[in-house]
Amino acid sequence: MSIVRIAHSPTTGNAPAALLAGQIALNEADTKLFYRSPAGAVISMLLVDANGRFTVGGAAAQTLGGVTPGLQNFGLGAEANVAAARYTNDTVGSGFWMAKSRGASIGSHTILQSGDAIGTIGWLPDNGSNLTNFGAMIQGVMDGTPSATSLPGRISFNTTQANAVAVTEAARIDSSQQLRFMQTPTSSLGVTTCQIRADDQGGLSIAQASNAMICSNFGNFIIVFETTNNNMAIYIATAAIVVMIAAAGTFWVSPTSTPGTSNGSVNYDGSQNYRIYTGATVGTRTYKWFVIKIGGN
């Protein structure tokens, strides 16, 4: 029969010498719990340090990500994993909750402010010296001023880029439930994108500033609807506009961003005429444009 021994070891962190196989002992010197296996191996089960931190599987609590968490679990294999399982005949599963209050004492309640982090999940890669910097992070953040009847929140996705050691926000799902990409890399067209929006018709658009875009093939094809002037432009392969359709019905095919007389341009002149600019030369004469008249005589 195994017994629990409360014994004293003269050396902090050591198991009592009298600990027998199959027995558990609490070292009074540093409140560390030991177990000696039937094979004789001494296993450190739990350490409770002077600050009330619980460490499982380690000789001491470690500083991770710049802080020393109150509950730590270490291992050389699967014992380092943490799991939760619920066995009930209902629709409820196991859960993991994080909470945040601005209250200064445990159990007190003080409302948060916009921008406050509610909880964080972080990944800490070893850089060869320490486990201080995050490689990736997900945060729950207040996305507006909260109240008893309104708790707007967002989820922030953060990663550390190459040649950096600090995470930056890459994307977020905000309180309006829109997915937004926070970085704005410049595409080959000189156009930047930063946000994916869901509209009230069940569609999606990729947006930059006030312009809505549809992009494909890494920026080689972009359709832009400019909400500031209600124009629509199509870019292909280069930074030049290939097709522009203006709000007034004018359209042109041109390497420029405004209607003009460049070779290959097509535009509506506002008088029911479409002009096709060619610059073609026949004999000694250069033909600047062809006119297609719509309506009238």
Image: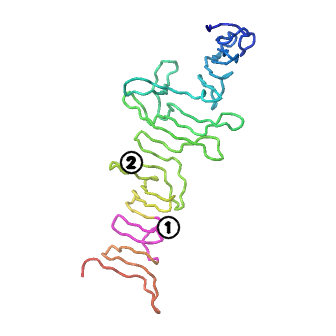
The quadrant where residue 10 appears: top right
> Magenta stretch containing residue 12, yes or no?
no
Question: Relative to 184, is 268 on the left or the right?
Answer: left
Label located before the other in sequence (2 or 1): 2
The residue under the point 44% across, 40% down is 174
- Residue range in magenta is 235-262
| 64 relative to 251, above or below | above
Mark in the foreground, 2 or 1: 2
Q: CA distance from mark 2 to mark 1?
A: 28 Å
Q: Quadrant of the C terminus?
A: bottom left
Q: Amino acid at mark 2?
A: Ala
The quadrant where residue 93 appears: top left
| 190 relative to 268, above or below | above
Nearest the camera: 214 or 104? 214
Residue underneath mark 2: 198
The residue under the point 42% across, 79% down is 277
Nearest the camera: 30 or 139? 30
